[in-house]
Structure formats: C-alpha cells, structure tokens
Amino acid sequence: MITRQSGDADGPTPGPASAPTDGAVKTPPHNATVHDSEAGHGPRNQTVVALALGAIGVVYGDIGTSPLYALREALRPVAHDGLSRGEVLGVISLLIWTVTLIVTIKYVIVLLRADNHGEGGILALYTLTRLAIGRRSIPVLMLGIAGAALFFGDSIITPAMSVLSAVEGISLVAPHFESYVVPVTIGILLVLFIVQRHGTQAIAVLFGPITALWFLVMGVMGAIQIFADPEVLVAFNPVYGVKFLFSHGVLAFLVMGAVFLAVTGAEALYADLGHFGRAPIRLAWFVLVFPALILNYLGQGALVLQHPDAIENPFFLMVSPKVLPFLVTLATVATVIAAQAVITGAYSMTRAAIQLGLLPRLSIFHTSESQSGQIYIPAVNWLLLFGVLAFVLAFGSSEKLASAYGISVTGAMLVDTTLFIIFAYRGWRWSKPLILVAATPMVLLEGTFLLSNLTKVPQGGYVPVILSISLCVIMFAWWRGTQLAFERGHREMVELDGFAKSMQRSSAHVVPGTAIFLTADSQAVPPALLHNLKHNRVLHEKNVILTVQTERVPTVPVMERAVYAPIDDRFARLTLRFGFMETPNVTRALGQARRVGLKFDVMTTSFFLGRRKVVAGARQGVPLLFDKLFIALGRFAADPSDYYSLPRDRVVELGSRMTV
C-alpha cells in the first residue's frame, strides 16, 4: 500500500509555511532525541543480530559488488607487458589497506561516532558542523552542497556499473551472449526503477539473507584459491604496496584510481546509520563483510598469480564452469540489491536536502505503513533512470564505465573528511595535533585517489564532474533564492502583534470558524490574511498563524511537535516542528496540537495559502542567472496542499507578486 505524504521545503515560492535555512532555522531543545514513533528509522526493538543481517543487505550491497571489477581494473594498467608476482602482490596489498584505512578506520570506527541524534550521512555531518560553528558559514554550506551533489552523481553511476559488471559474467557461460549484455542490463534496470513506486517492503526481508549468502560465497571462493597459493597472504604486509607505488611512478598513480573502486559504497554505511544503528553496522562489517572482501581479493590475487590470463575476469574465473551459472545468477541478484540500496539512499538524501532548503519540495510517497524511511520520490526516480540508462548506452561495458566511476565517490569522501575535521575541532574539541595526526593520512590518501581519478576525465570522467557541478549550481541557486525571497518578505512585513491589537477596533465583518494561515515568518502578518481582509473584507472568528519549522535534528519527538501561543482571543501562533529527515504532515500534527491548547473544528476550518509569483529583479550577470534558475526551479515544486498533507476541500489560495 502506498500513502501520499508531503515533503518539506521553504521559501515563498516553494511553500509559505517554512522559513528558509542554511541547515536549519532554530536550535532544537537539548533534550530532542530520536524517539519519534512517526520517524520509523528502523525498529528499535529488533536484536542487534537481526539488524546486522538487514544492514548487510542495505548498507553493504554496493561495496559488496566491488570485487566484481576492482582488482581487474587495478591490474589492467600494469598488465600490458605481463604481470610479475611483485605487481600482483603490491596491488592486492593496496586493496587490503585501502579498505582497512578508509572503510574500517575512517567510517566504521570514527565517523559512525559523528551522529546527529542517531542519523548519519553527508547532510547530517554538515548540520553537525554548522551547529558546532554556531553561525552561518558559506564555505561549510558549499561543502554540504558539494557532498550531496557528489552523492547524487554516485547514485546514477553505481547501478549502471554494478548491473553491467554482473551481466557481463553471463558471457563466460555463453560466449554468444556478449551482444545481449547491454539490452539485458537495460531490461533489468527498467524493471528495477519501475517497481519502485510499489515499494520494496515485501521483498526487502530477503535482501539481508541473499547478500549474506553473497558474502559467504565470496569468502569461500577466495579461501579455496588461497589454499592453492598461500604466498598471496604476504600481501597483508603494507611494504608490498609501498614498494609498488615507488617502483611504478606514474603508472602506480593510475592504478590508485582503480584501487579506489574497492571502497565505493563506504558512504552508505554512514548514511544508513539512522536505519540500523552503530552496533549492527559494525557487527556486520567485522564478522562477515570485511573478512569476505579481504578473502576474495586475496583469492583473486592467488588465481592471477597461478594463471595470469585470468586477469580478463578474475572474479568469475575463480569457480569451475559448473558453478559459474549459479555465481552469475547470484551476482546479478546481488547487484540489483546493491542498486536498490543506492536508489533508496538517493530518496533519503533528496528528502534531507529539501528539508534543509537545498532543493524545492517534491512529491514524496510512503511505500510502507510501518517505516517512514521507505519512501518513493517520482521525480528523483525517473531522473535516476534516465541517467543510469544514458551511462549504460554511452559506455556499453563496465570496463569503459570504470573511467567515469570513482570521481564522485572520492570527491564525496574528501568532503566527508573535510567536514569531519571542522566538526572534530569545533564540536568534539579535538586538539590541533590530534586532528593533524588523525586526518593527514586520510586527506593524503583520498586526495591522491581524487587526483588519480581526475586523470580519467578525458575517458569519460568529465560526465560525473559536469553532473556534480550542475547539481551544486541548482542547490546553491535554490538556497540563495529562498534566502533572498524570505528577506524581501521580512522587510515588507506588517508586525503581527500590533496588527492583532488594531483588529480589536476593526469594522471588518467577522465570520464564524477558524482560519489557519501558513506562513514562513511567525512575527509577520501572512500576506494571505491581508489579501483576504482587503479583497473579501472579512475576518475569521479565530485566526491561527501557522509556521512549519525544520529543526537541525533528524526527527522531533511527538510531544515536542507543536508549540501554541495565543496572542489574544482572536489571534494565535502555532509552530509545528519537524526534523530534516521527516516529511511534515500538517493534518496529523494539528491533531497533536490539540494537546497544547489549539481548539478547532476541522469542518469549520479553512487553510489559507499565499502563492507568490516570483520575478527577477534588476540584477545583471551571474546573479541574474541564479535568479532565473531559482524561478524556474520553483515551477517544479510540489503543490503546498499536497506537500503538507492539507485537506484539499478546506484550502484557499491567494496569490501575490514578488521581485527578488
């Protein structure tokens, strides 16, 4: 069953009820914690083991498909003149220590501690950093925007890369199938994106067990090959990796770009912190995922040491032809699950970006009655599908697509590291020497990976670069526009308390019932109220000025949802508070507002929305372009009554014109 809900947004164009924000508007109460029953960020009563099994399917699906192509692409630059044992062991060592340093130490051990009331991910880290600084910071804002844009870029490339690499394995079973790889990949992706609107709750329970089987199979495959050539175990010694780097010069720099493919998906374990919790994610990593990945990379290395021609596809060639059909089928299913996790992550990221004022509000549907984290955003779904299919058709193979893969991921990880450095210094009060010791290796490693991946720009790497820059421009234009529009409206405002006092002596006709006016500024008279009074010459018996406020926490407890403040017997303020990971449902929240004193009869209540037509001002050059982009984006914003889940038959819209 799908239920329609509303997202969030702010600013005059997107919706009259939310104030624009660069991360949030108000500081939430110190006791605001994640225990809102509406939040649904994963059942808290499940055991750690059960949650760990679920995390294996959702959190680790992307990184779990990296062995399909990571070692193959890392060895390719040095394989043109044959492979020596030192080269194979060096690359394996680089893979092992890259996974250890970036995933295990940076994300699993350190970054999982940087949670925003239980939530993780780039925007949660941005919000933590913004709070730690205590003021608006444009550089920090731009880091948050860049991180979100790079994440979206990764969300487009990952499904194409994962599914393509799995389907290509079929050609090893049936060589004549090679010409059908692209059509079959497109078919799988089409089905995957089309079924999103129906939700994945029915089959999501299988994601964990299937992906766990995938990791077990990978680990066993690797162990069998290691027994055939135990010498590969010396790759645990980082000296082999260091020697490879110093002995291969520029070529080693290119190899590093491919080595990074082994950690694509690491951001997911941080982003999904709110769904599963720190303990289950760590348990899944240390007990199953990490050992399986390392065993598989070692096993692929052992195979290549024995049979150098296996570099063509070392993952699938680890098994006998009899087992290959099963492995290809399991790999295809695993990559579809990984793609599903990435798509779900894109939905969650979009909702958070909307709530933080970085994107216009979009229609959001809930595909689960029990978990609000399972959502579907049509606009994002079809844009992702278009981008994924474009990548598949343009590149045609995982080998060529690998050239475009990595830039978005390395960029996002470097943004994570930068924001974490600021947060650790300002929020955790780490000393500068401690930050220097902890962060320098990560900055150098990820910076090297980014520079290495940038060498792939001519071969297709320009695509994610252009895509990420475009998304950055869109998000900054929207944030800037909402700020300007809000400030313009604030300058022209009529002060509410004085207006309410003057209405006590007004000769306006008073009609029975309650009027609820949605506005972004609770201190000002809503334009819709002024227009109603001016043109209809009526005033309701009860007038409630409603502001929907996005807090700097992922969720707001139900008991802290509503704040009601009467002005006099005719006017009152009502603030409804939602976290940036929630979708505001005003109708439901009004029921909760009765607890704090709001008295109304829904059958005699009207909701007034002020719809503003925004036009560009007299600015020239780049500012004018940003203004026009903001106006254009506003046309795609969802209808406020749908977005805030207002009763359609009780909504009145009054228009006005604004110049930004």
Image (cartoon, rainbow, N blue to C red):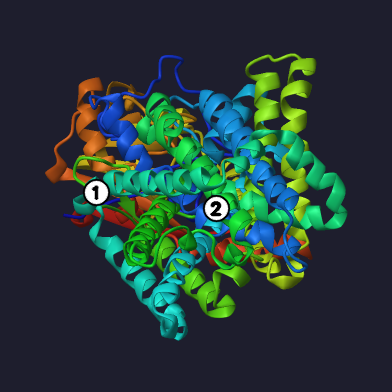
Residue ID for mark 2 = 300
- Identified at 31% across, 70% down, the residue is 191
**How many marks do you count on the picture?**
2
| Residue 573 percent across, percent down from the top left | 36, 29
Q: Is residue 347 left or right of residue 299?
A: left
- Identified at 50% across, 51% down, the residue is 12
Query: Which quadrant would the C terminus be assigned to in this image?
Result: bottom right
Asked which quadrant contains residue 469, the reply is bottom right
| Residue 57 percent across, percent down from the top left | 35, 45
Instruction: Kindly tell me whether residue 619 is visible in this rendering.
Output: no
Instruction: Kindly tell me whether residue 83 is visible in this rendering.
Output: yes
In depth, the one of 294 and 31 nearer the eye is: 294
In depth, the one of 396 and 93 nearer the eye is: 93
Q: Residues within 10 Å of mark 1 (few under 14, many from 20)?
A: some
Q: Secondary structure at mark 1?
A: helix
| Residue 521 percent across, percent down from the top left | 48, 37
Q: Residues within 10 Å of mark 2 (few under 14, many from 20)?
A: many
Q: Is residue 413 left or right of residue 203?
A: right
- In terms of sequence position, does the residue under pointer 1 or pointer 2 come before the other? 1
Q: Secondary structure at mark 2?
A: helix
Measure how far apart labels 1 and 2 are at the Cα level: 28 Å
Amino acid type for the residue under numbered disc 1: Leu
Asked which quadrant contains residue 42, the reply is top left
Q: On screen, 227 above or below 576?
A: below
Residue ID for mark 1 = 206
Amino acid type for the residue under numbered disc 2: Gln
